[in-house]
Amino acid sequence: MALGDRSPRADHAARTRKAIIDAALQLCASQGFDNTTTDEIAESAGVSPRTFFRYFPTKESVFFFGEYDFIRSFATLYLAQADDVSDLEAMRATFVTLAPAVARLRRRISLYLKAVESSPTLRGRERSNHQENAATLAQAIADRRGLLTPDVDCELLAAVGLLVMERALAAWADGPSRPALGDVLAAEFERLEKLLS
């Protein structure tokens, strides 16, 4: 088997996972997360409730699948940025580099934002994930600065960077198909840099 090839079983699992995610996003965005059952999601995805729970331990977990991978990708790319650029510039360049992969998920992101808005449960889980993501970013900033652990400056920059990313993502997901997500992100970071200068 060539490197990168997937088995039929892996392909089937990926298709099943995608069907469950798409069904959950569509249903929860239209009728609210708290009003949607896992049985409804499973039926819409064409799988049994048992299969649903084989892929996702809870209804909430469907909404945060892959988020950790994105944050880890950010940390890796951020640490690869040139040493002669500021931490903020490195953060902007990293988010812009990752933007094309995120942009392919535009419809999912728009549905996700609607579903989260519908539910205190999801908003709470998102807040918890946000704190974990900020801690991961703060550690990457600390690593870039040669620190063993993040100081308050690293934590603040991580929190601000995530906020800028979230603002850009929300504006892009709800706006017209153009401009590109990378352009929206770059503009948001430029706006921040002007405010700080």
Image (cartoon, grey):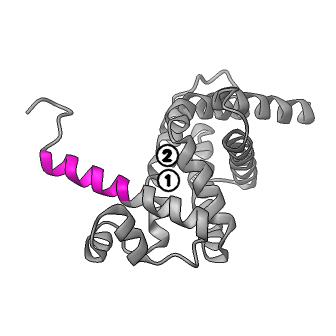
Q: Amino acid at mark 1?
A: Glu
Q: Quadrant of residue 103?
A: top right
Identify the image quadrant of residue 92. Answer: top right
Mark 2 highlights which residue? 70
Q: Residue at x 71, y 44 (%)?
A: 174
Name the element at disc 2.
helix
Q: Position of residue 25 (x, y in %)?
A: 51, 59
Q: Nearer the viewer, residue 161 or 41?
A: 41
The quarter of the rendered structure image containing the C terminus is top right
Q: Which residue corresponds to mark 1?
A: 67
Magenta stretch: give its range. 8-19
In the picture provided, is 16 more to the left or to the right than 75? left
Dots 1 and 2: beta carbons under 8 Å? yes
Residue 115 coordinates in the image, percent (x, y): 61, 64
Residue 131 visible within the image = no
Q: Position of residue 122 (x, y in %)?
A: 60, 70
Judged by its main secondary structure, the magenta piece is helix
On the rendered structure, is 194 left or right of 110? right
User: Where on the picture, by quarter, is residue 16?
Assistant: bottom left
Question: How far is mark 1 from mark 2, CA to CA?
Answer: 5 Å
Residue in the image at 44% along x and 60% along y: 23
Type of the residue with mark 2:
Phe
How many discs mark residues in the rendered view?
A: 2
